[in-house]
Image: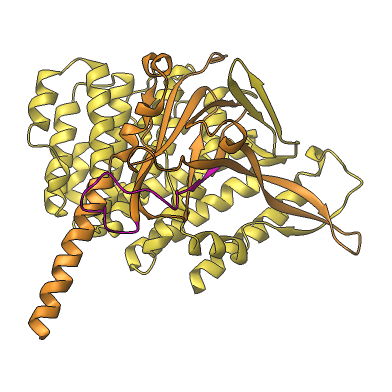
Amino acid sequence: MKNRNFYFGITALTFSCLLVSCGGEDTDNNNEVNNVVLDTLENLESNNSSGVHYSVPTPNELFEIVKLQGGKKESGLVNPLENRENYVETKEKALAFGVYSADLAYMSCFGVGTEFLKYMKTIEEMGDELGISGAFDEDLMDRIENNEGDTDSLFAISNETYYDSYLYLEENEKGTELSLIMGGGYIESLYIICNLVDKYKEGDPIIEKIGDQKLVLENLLEFVSKYQDDQAVQEMINDLISLKEVFEISMEFKESETNVEKSNGKLVLSGGGSYKMTEQALKDITAKVTELRENIIN
Amino acid sequence: MKKVLIFAALIIGIVAIEAYAQCRKTHYFCTSLLSEEQQKEYWTLNNQSKSALFEKGKVYKMSFIAYKGFDYRISVCTDVVEGGDKVRFDLQHDAIVRVKDEYGNTNIRRQRETLYKNADDNLSPTVEFSVDETKKFYIDVNVPASGESSDRKLKTTDNVCVGVLIEHKKGQKLGF
């Protein structure tokens, strides 16, 4: 509870700083903001007590949209397999498992490298060590070998494996491992997309996707907070909160009215306020996520 | 007596786990509620989809992220046998708005807004949408108070399986 208070306190505080620094974006400058009531303990506690399930997009979904929006592959971004020897403690292994899972999603989506099978084998072995080998299909490796070189099939397999692992861990009450894996996967995915960008350009869809990870991080934090009694998860939450602060301080808030339109049987939803990326935000987020990733992989 | 209680607790535990596992992919069956035309459309299963064992008459809540650039289709279903009540669901988001208090001070608050109610759309089991920017959504599913689960293990209980199927596909406006 103490930690949650800290988390929400930080959120409100950083949002106050954000509003002070982003006056230029306000649509109504005559209205001086006196108070910020966002992510209050009351709001989030009531959400939790009513049992909201927070879903988090998988690395596959992120890489899929990044590729569709023009993301180009870069080599040298994934965590080298040689680093595996660094992971001894359960926490280190679970975080690294998440990192390698995100690497697999990236490699299969962008067709990077020829080491998909080696990465998959490493993940399977680490899963064994973590006691979660039941998450993998018996014929998984055969399916990968049969589809080697077929990017679409490997992407589908990596997506399916991530989802089945998630279900297995949730059903078998391995929430601690699941939290660490999701945290590692999130950090690695964000690190990779930050490094797909050469320089800041306003309106660049890949840079927008980096900013969008703030919302993903919010849901991730809500999800893993269920397991915050575990010390390893708590440490990871503290790291993620420090990253959330960077998002909130460096991004600009833009207010806009919610609008719902219907076009050809489909709703078009817009407005409602959002955060916008800036050149400084890109630098700060890239620096922070690189630091957190270094701590995980080395 | 103690042994009997432990045994009973074990059995209840196993049944609960089995029932939970039984529900795990309820969302896969939500497409059966769609029209033939809708079923033929190509959509990708989104891994934020969720199935859960839930008590009749209660509200199941979940949150998910929708990326700008994708179109989304949300379908909601239960495993209640035919003839049961239809599911009601709402799609919501948190708008961040300025609110003036009684002293005239301007405060910034997160305010939950309902964007779509299937009750206003002939209780349609599905809704399609796109977003102008990546957004966090909430879905409230009102689990019908009546009707029996089609799962024989749940028939005599107050629980049914609830599925929220999220699908996505490439939107029309992508890239630079």
Q: Nearer the viewer, residue B34 or A207?
A: B34
- Residue A25 placed where, x, y %? 78, 38
**What color was chain A assigned in the picture?**
yellow
Quadrant including the N terminus of chain B: bottom left
Could you say where residue B19 lies in the image, as x and y percent from the top left?
23, 53
Report the quarter where the C terminus of chain B lies.
Answer: top right
Residue B162 forms part of the magenta stretch: no
- Identify by letter the chain in orange: B
User: Would you say A122 lies left or right of B110 here?
Assistant: left
Residue A182 x, y percent position in the rendering: 35, 47
Above or below, comparing residue A5 to residue A53 in the picture: below
Considering depth in this image, is A296 or A42 the residue closer to the camera?
A: A42
Expressed as whole percent of the image width and height from the top left, the position of residue A49 reads 49, 64
Tell me: A216 left or right of A247: left
Q: Which residues are magenta?
A: B137-158
Q: Nearer the viewer, residue B22 or B152?
A: B152
Residue A126 showing in the rendered view: no
User: Front-most of A223 and B152?
Assistant: B152
